[in-house]
Amino acid sequence: MNVSYILLLLALLPSTSPFHLFPPPRPVLNLHSSQKKFDCVIVGSGLGGLTAAATLQRLYGRDCVVLEQHEDAIGGVAHSFTLKNSAGPFQFDAGPSLLTGLSRPSYNPLRQIFDLLSLPMPPMIEYDGWKVQSKGEMKDLGLEGEGEGWVEFEVKTGGGGFGEEIERVFGREAMKLFTEFTDLILEKNGLYESSCGVPPFVLRGDKYAAITLTRSLPSLLKIGPKGGKILTSSFDKFYDSFISKSDRNPLAETFLRNYFNYLSFALSGYTMERTQTAPVAYMIGDLHLPGSSVNFPEKGTALGGIIDVLVSGIKEKGGTISNSENVKSLILNSSNKCIGVRSNDKDIFARDGVVLNVGIWSLPGILRETLRIGGEFDEGFLRERIEHAEGKHVKNARKMFERAFLTICFRFNTGNE
Ligand SMILES: *[C@@H]1O[C@H](CO)[C@@H](O)[C@H](O)[C@H]1NC(C)=O
């Protein structure tokens, strides 16, 4: 969903890479002794890395290797862990655990990838909401009063009762502001409908957005000539233009901003300043239109089953997943193209490209190490990227992680434990 090139660096290389420009590769990887070069090297086995590998391997017939740092874990932040007490062992999910639009064909990009690659989605249960708890200064939470406090409310999906819940906890003004804003997004020919007409695959935040978006022109025209621009711009622009036209009640506005920062964070790991409008718009439909629900797998952890399916989907077509791979730096050629990576003490080359799907915290380190080792590439080029990778948005994301003190509990409406 997040098309920022910080998270996804895709360097397309032709099929014959001039390996001779580089020092001879160090001892060959202990992956499969027969395989030393790949078409694509994917660093990081998070959901992004696995979906990239599955798509390249299954749809484009590329020979892929996924390099994962952990000894035995696959899935990146989307993993689970077990804690035990006298009542028994409990399993907890880290990373994404708020799932919508997976139980049936939908606009959820993960569901679309599964359908596109003919991968079976694990059976899902549908729930009607979840509970949010957060701690902070009362006014920062959007509540009357002084000092620190807790807030707890239920996000009710499917259009029923969430307005009442907002009114109960945050007051009438907050409910009115929320209703007005979501109605605007969900209105006929509005942002939600247009975002549904645009496949997630063509959403990108770079200068080529306009080119790929033209294929979805009919649905964009519904929201006027600026439609494509609005959908691919960051959500705060749309939000701010709405807020500037409304009668402001500061506490109500704080609630609304918190809620949409929370949804943006759930989608992209960033606040709304760094989250595209289109995914937020269709998430609002996914959550708040009549009949919508949240999903959780029938068995296992939030994403465990999904990750298993992706892994076997990659391996089934000959792809490789290798654990204990500590990628410390990239290999750039004199045209500043990434043609491989250095993992542990060996070089792994990619004929077609390298997908770097590492966390924003690790990226600067990898780029700095690349600079330290040096090569024939232009150092200024790399320094610029390092500056970007250490920029303000990364610091903001870190702050958000620190503030995200959230507990999510599903309401059970199935009668099961
Ligand atoms: C660097 O790699 C790219 C992609 O493989 C290639 O197009 C380019 O010719 C290479 N540059 C040099 C100087 O070999």
Image (tube, helix red, strand yellow):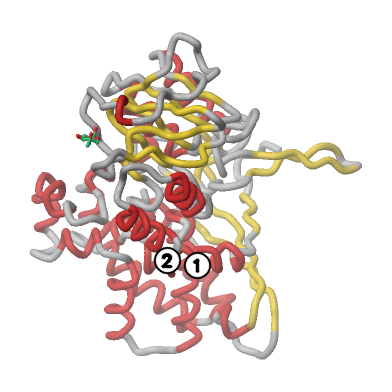
- How packed is label 1: few (under 14 Cα within 10 Å), some, or many (20 or more)? few
Residue 128: image location, x then y, percent? 52, 50
Residue 376: image location, x then y, percent? 32, 43
Q: Residue at x 36, y 48 (%)?
A: 1
Beta carbon of the mark 1 residue lies under 8 A of ligand 1: no
* Residue with the mark numbered 2: 391
Identify whether 128 is placed above or below 164: above
The quarter holding residue 285 reads: bottom left
Which residue is situated farthest in the right direction here?
Answer: 86
**Numbered marks: total:** 2
Q: Residue at x 46, y 67 (%)?
A: 261
* Residue with the mark numbered 1: 395
Is 200 on the left-hand or right-hand side of 102?
Answer: left
Is residue 248 in view from this perspective?
yes
Question: The residue tagged with tag 1: helix, strand or loop?
Answer: helix
Say what amino acid the circle numbered 2 marks. Gly
Residue 180: image location, x then y, percent? 34, 74
Viewer-nearest residue: 7 or 379: 379
Say what amino acid the circle numbered 1 marks. Lys
Q: Residue at x 34, y 71 (%)?
A: 236
Question: The residue tagged with tag 2: helix, strand or loop?
Answer: loop
Is residue 285 in view from this perspective?
no
